[in-house]
Image (spheres, rainbow, N blue to C red):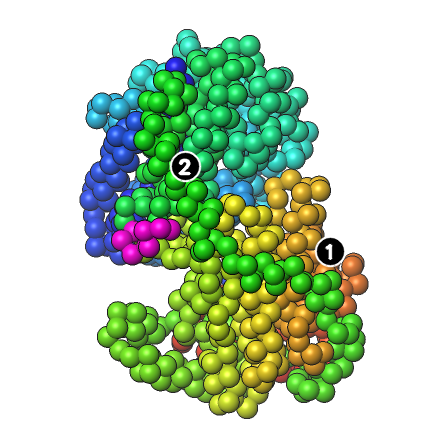
Amino acid sequence: MVHSSVLGFPRMGKLRDLKKATEAYWADKLSKDELLAEGKRLRLEHWKIQKDAGVDIIPSNDFAYYDQVLDHIQMFNAIPERYSKHGLSTLDEYFAMGRGHQKDGIDVPSLEMVKWFDSNYHYVKPTLQDNQTFKLSEDSKPVRHFLEAKEAGIITRPVLLGPVSFLHLGKADRGQKVDPISLLDKLLPVYEQLLKELKKAGAETVQIDEPVLVFDLPTKIRNAFKPAYEKLTALQGTEGPQLVLATYFGDIVHNFDVIDSALKGTHALHVDLVRNPEQLDKVVEHLGEKQILSVGVVDGRNIWKNNLKKSVEVVESAVQKLGKDRVIVATSSSLLHTPHTLESEQKLDSDVKDWFAFATEKAREVAVIAKAVTEGPASVKSELEANAKSLQARATSKRTNNPEVKKRQEGVTKEMHERQSGFPTRYDQQKEHLKLPLFPTTTIGSFPQTKDIRISRNKFTKGEITAEEYEKFIEKEIRDVIAVQDELELDVYVHGEPERNDMVQYFGERMDGYVFTTHAWVQSYGSRCVRPPIVVGDISRPAPMTVKESKYAASVSKKPMKGMLTGPITCLRWSFPRDDVHQSVQAQQLALALRDEVVDLEAAGIYVIQVDEPALREGLPLRAGAEREKYLSWAVDSFKLSTAGVKDSTQIHSHFCYSEFQDFFHAIAALDADVLSIENSKSDAKLLKVFIDEAYPRHIGPGVYDIHSPRVPSEQEIKDRIEEMLQYLKPDQLWINPDCGLKTRGWKETKAALGNMVAAAQYYRSKH
Ligand code: GLN
Ligand code: ZN
């Protein structure tokens, strides 16, 4: 028979229970035992949900208090000494690596956290030493959780991150030279031991994730699979469990030689057929003789109902070639990236709600598909029919299709993407118009989002204060931040974004084509969750979205006021996009809506306009080559379309929360923004070298200080930073600004840091 399986389940719980518990523990409001008990309760609940949904193969060890990669770091004892030397409890040492520890005389920052492939989830990077050793921790969490489930009557398939991915996703610690993959021989015995222990505990199969197989891999990484998997597969069925090797977020066709030489020996291979359905036939050809294929047909990255009929067909085509016993139906990846359950959404209109499936519902989809293939469609007739009806309703809904938007898209021309003149002409006019000094100072948009602001917004949302009262409150906030900027003598002002709950949600709420949930939270990192808006239909802007606040701000300010928008790619990437039209189409719709906003801002007297695109980079396809170029081309076009409607004298800024532009610098340059502000204070200033090498002609504000910490940089530190930047940028090219927005900071450190920043800029101004 065809079994159903889930690769991983979200951990937060129905009401973000895990977030609440961990944060209470951090605040000393919950004891360690209480937190551990809450973790256990959630695990049991999640296993039960999957069991009740009819899933045959349920994962364990997918749970983590902070991050699953961090769990492996601790489990393998790959803990840098700066965390291990304090005698912290195992749990506190774990959180110290995840989020830093500043308590009882201990002061260590966290390990580096980076985005997990092309998702908005962040993992903690394994950070390795030249003399690194590994040792399996005494408390083997995968074994413990397996037994916990077993006791509850559920036999699970433990999930491990594979050794090659663990190392390839890691890095040498600061000051260390070790090449992570060179540690493979030292790491493998730990995996062997762990697999043996799991087998002893009763685990017949283990899911071992090697997601790096979707990348273009350097030879030494490709070559690492063979020795690793010869060892691990040799244990299969005797001393160790059967291995299900899982890949996701891309295809593995370009790594078939690795599969051939190293991975055919695993019991099963899982591939993502949502992202790359076309790989199925080739993967089938490359399977080992008895190897089982796990076909990921239910999307682990989105919230749309599965097309069950189509999935059944895909699975059946695999069954025809392999037989029922060699096919498993699965989610494409872990469901970590989807919200917990649709049941919690009480406010969604029922027509739209019927289009969605969150983790709990997806678990059922996997089971239904497997049953339809095993026992025939009649066995799940009513579910298949209901599914077909939902899909039909969605395809023909008025919400999905807006003929006016389509018509406008047809009228988009090449010229609409270009500013009237080239940069030199524009710059002359902007100089004349804006009268900015050398080394102009500005901020990235938001000022501290105080408790007062949140309380007031909540009251307004709940109807406890009127729209008018709320507007008065926002105006006062705007006046206050302008007074602060006056005092600080900044050059280009911002209104502070007090009216915005979130830089994507705020715009989504003001556009047609979006819907919002109340509980659809997805883990972003640690205890932090985001609640992405959902694009359900063609997007348009019924009315101006930001003009009122910016215009008011400009009217009470004596210096140029910068308008502040979130760009089309970021709006798209930080939402759940539609899956029925290409993302480039959705980006163009967003671009047209934003273009109208940009033009309206200019008409309202805003002559500096910043369009933030921090998510541009994470949208980059995981492999270099044609696909990446295609993405960059439509992404750049959508930015240009949104900004090119203004006069030459209006200055367009853009902002990025990173400065590693090396691999796609041509796209950044092609945006044709007059000024770029980029996060740079924690990275090497050498990254700016690309701007000289490529003779970048326009202006740049690399962040001069880190806004993620309350620490106040001294004036001298900022001067040193500027001095370094001047090695790579010309004085009349350089803007002075912080790394990013200040919304998570307090007022005290914000004023002090900006004061030092302005003083440093003034010093350089007087020198030039
Ligand atoms: N303008 C936004 C802010 O200042 C930018 C945030 C971001 O880049 N993530 O908050
Ligand atoms: Zn930023």
- Kind of residue sitting beneath label 1: His
Report the residue marked by disc 2. 388
> Could you tell me which secondary element the residue under label 2 belongs to?
helix
- Kindly indicate the quadrant of the structure image that contains residue 202: top left
Q: What percent of the width, then of the height, locates residue 51?
A: 28, 28
Q: What percent of the width, then of the height, locates residue 369?
A: 40, 27
Q: Which residues are magenta?
A: 345-352
Q: Is residue 434 left or right of residue 561?
A: right
> Could you tell me which secondary element the residue under label 1 belongs to?
helix
Q: Is residue 566 left or right of residue 372?
A: right
Q: Are marks 1 and 2 in contact (CB under 8 Å)?
A: no
Q: Quadrant of the C terminus?
A: bottom right
- Kindly indicate the quadrant of the structure image that contains residue 68: top left
Residue located at (20% from left, 44% from top):
34
Cα separation between marks 1 and 2: 45 Å
User: Along the line of sight, which residue is nearer the eye, 232 or 60?
Assistant: 60
Q: What percent of the width, then of the height, locates residue 159?
A: 40, 28
Report the residue marked by disc 1. 666
Neighbor class of circle 1 (other Cα within 10 Å; few <14, some 14-19, many 20+) is few
Mark 1 or mark 2: which is in front? 2
